[in-house]
């Protein structure tokens, strides 16, 4: 049987990006003389792409944005974030070891993030991680983005994967929803930026450290998902 494709979310799943996101976001909103946001605010701000993050941060600090204000702020964010990459950003503990191990068994990897694709690529390049992934797609790669199934299914297609041999791993609601919408099992990690406990998102399973991301776990998830699928327990959304 073909080895599975493991599709990762980026912010809060592959990489601990919080320090640099907070720094660039605060640099961005300082242009409007708004007070800085805190790390704790990120759970509510991150996961829907940079535009939403900037809009929400401004609203949080008492300044709802007009459509005219957003483009300049987005450019300010992109410039600052790009210039400082990789900054303090680093892979979560055990990630590289787990990927190397899974790779040696033939597993393949892709990234499906709502970050702008260009930012995701530059960040992964500067951390020398790009070569691990057969596809990297962002919130602006397709006409739709997470939680729309099309973003995940498009990522799988670009990686040459088979949707019946894929799992999605992420830290927040959009990751769990995109997997459910695409008919693919999900693994949640609790160390990212969800504003609710990840168990309440009802992922297929939860791992609290990448040491738990083993081939046994992945094969078990795929077996259960495919038998539920074959028995008609879950809707056939995979190829819609
Ligand atoms: O909000 C973002 O920039 C992206 O977040 P994600 O990598 O968790 O999808
Ligand atoms: Mg995330």
Image (tube, helix red, strand yellow):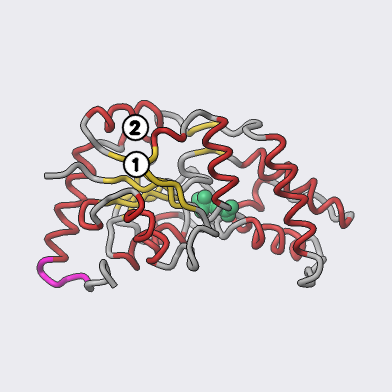
On the image, the x and y values in percent for residue 11 come to 53, 46
Helix, strand, or loop for circle 2? helix
On the image, the x and y values in percent for residue 180 come to 33, 65
Disc 1: which residue: 109
Residue pictured at 68% horizontal, 40% vertical: 82
On the image, the x and y values in percent for residue 223 come to 14, 52
> Which region shows up in magenta?
230-234
Extreme-right residue of the structure: 33
Helix, strand, or loop for circle 1? strand
Disc 2: which residue: 99
Q: Quadrant of the N terminus?
A: top left
Residue pictured at 50% horizontal, 58% vertical: 141
Inter-mark Cα distance, 2 to 1: 8 Å
Crowding near pointer 2: few (<14 within 10 Å), some, many (20+)?
many
Report the magenta stretch's main SS.
Answer: loop
Q: Nearer the viewer, mark 2 or mark 1?
A: 1
**Contact flag, marks 2 and 1 (Cβ < 8 Å):** yes
Residue pictured at 32% horizontal, 27% vertical: 100
Residue pictured at 55% horizontal, 56% vertical: 47
On the image, the x and y values in percent for residue 27 come to 80, 46
Residue nearest the viewer, comparing 104 with 202: 104
Q: Quadrant of the C terminus?
A: bottom left
Which quadrant holds residue 203? bottom left
Task: Give the vertical position of 25 relative to 83 (above or below).
Answer: below
């Amino acid at each position: 049987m073909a080895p599975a494709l493991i599709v990762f979310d980026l912010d809060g799943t592959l990489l601990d990006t919080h320090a640099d996101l907070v720094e660039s976001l605060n640099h961005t909103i300082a242009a409007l003389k708004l007070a800085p946001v805190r790390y704790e605010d990120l759970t509510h701000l991150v996961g829907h792409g940079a535009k939403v993050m900037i809009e929400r941060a401004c609203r949080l600090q008492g300044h709802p944005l007009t459509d005219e204000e957003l483009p300049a702020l987005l450019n300010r964010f992109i410039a600052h974030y790009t210039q400082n990459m990789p900054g303090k950003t680093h892979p979560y503990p055990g990630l590289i070891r787990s990927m190397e191990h899974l790779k040696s068994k033939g597993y393949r990897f892709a990234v499906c993030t709502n970050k702008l694709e260009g930012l995701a690529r530059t960040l992964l390049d500067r951390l020398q991680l790009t070569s691990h992934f057969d596809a990297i797609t962002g919130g602006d790669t397709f006409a739709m983005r997470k939680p729309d199934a099309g973003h995940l299914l498009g990522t799988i297609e670009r990686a040459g994967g088979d949707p019946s041999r894929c799992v999605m791993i992420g830290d927040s609601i959009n990751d769990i929803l995109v997997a459910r919408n695409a008919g693919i099992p999900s693994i949640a990690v609790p160390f990212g930026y969800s504003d609710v406990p990840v168990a309440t998102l009802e992922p297929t399973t939860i791992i609290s450290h990448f040491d738990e991301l083993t081939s046994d776990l992945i094969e078990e998830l795929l077996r259960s998902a495919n038998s539920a699928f074959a028995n008609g327990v879950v809707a056939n959304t995979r190829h819609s």
